[in-house]
Amino acid sequence: MLSSPGLALRSIATLLLPLVVILSAVILSGCVSDLDISTPEQTLWEASLQGGLEQPGIFGNAAAISNSSRTEAGIQMTGLAPGTYAWRIREQSCNSPGAVVGGEGQYPDLVAEEPEGDEEPESVSGETAPFRATMQLDGSYHVEVREAVGDERVACGLFVRQ
């Protein structure tokens, strides 16, 4: 569970490190023909997710780094039942979801595996999702996790600009 502040911060730092490394490698390698870096400012967004009343043991963290033309995001969840889950960043709030940021096909699925024997379920980390869309500084965004089959939302969290 990600209930302790120290564990939550370490989890966020662990999640952000690959995002920063990937973005830095792209910029330093000169492979920036399709990435507009004329505005070097990047904005970090973070979210803590919780399951609803019917899923009280589900928790997670998400982070996104956005610049003037691109966003890269990642997610880590605990407490998911075995199965495949979809996650998306959306405009607005959990109670009033808006459009998907970057499009539906931009986010890799989360797969929660069946634990072996008496083991506790492991946390599930999603691959980072890079897409050519931005999270506007004055925008309101949330991240949601849904069952891939049935489309029931199992967790949601509001992004906070850092």
Image (tube, rainbow, N blue to C red):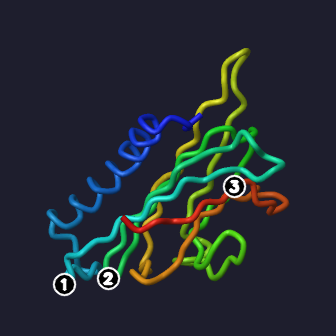
User: Judging from the image, what secondary structure is the residue with disc 3 in?
Assistant: strand
Give the foreground label among 3 and 1: 3
At label 3, the amino acid type is Ala
Q: Are marks 1 and 2 in contact (CB under 8 Å)?
A: yes
- Labels 3 and 1: the sequence-earlier one: 1
Q: Which residue is mark 3?
A: 155
Above or below, 2 against 28 in this view is: above
- Labels 3 and 2: the sequence-earlier one: 2
At label 2, the amino acid type is Ser
Above or below, 100 against 88 in this view is: below
Above or below, 20 against 123 in this view is: below
- Labels 1 and 2: the sequence-earlier one: 1
The residue at 65%/45% (across/down) is 111
Disc tally is: 3
Q: Which residue is mark 2?
A: 68
Distance of label 3 from label 2 (alpha carbons): 28 Å
Percent of width and height locating residue 79: 68, 38
At label 1, the amino acid type is Ser
Q: Which residue is mark 1?
A: 38
Depth check, front residue: 76 or 82:
76
Q: Residues within 10 Å of mark 1 (few under 14, many from 20)?
A: few
User: Judging from the image, what secondary structure is the residue with disc 2 in?
Assistant: loop
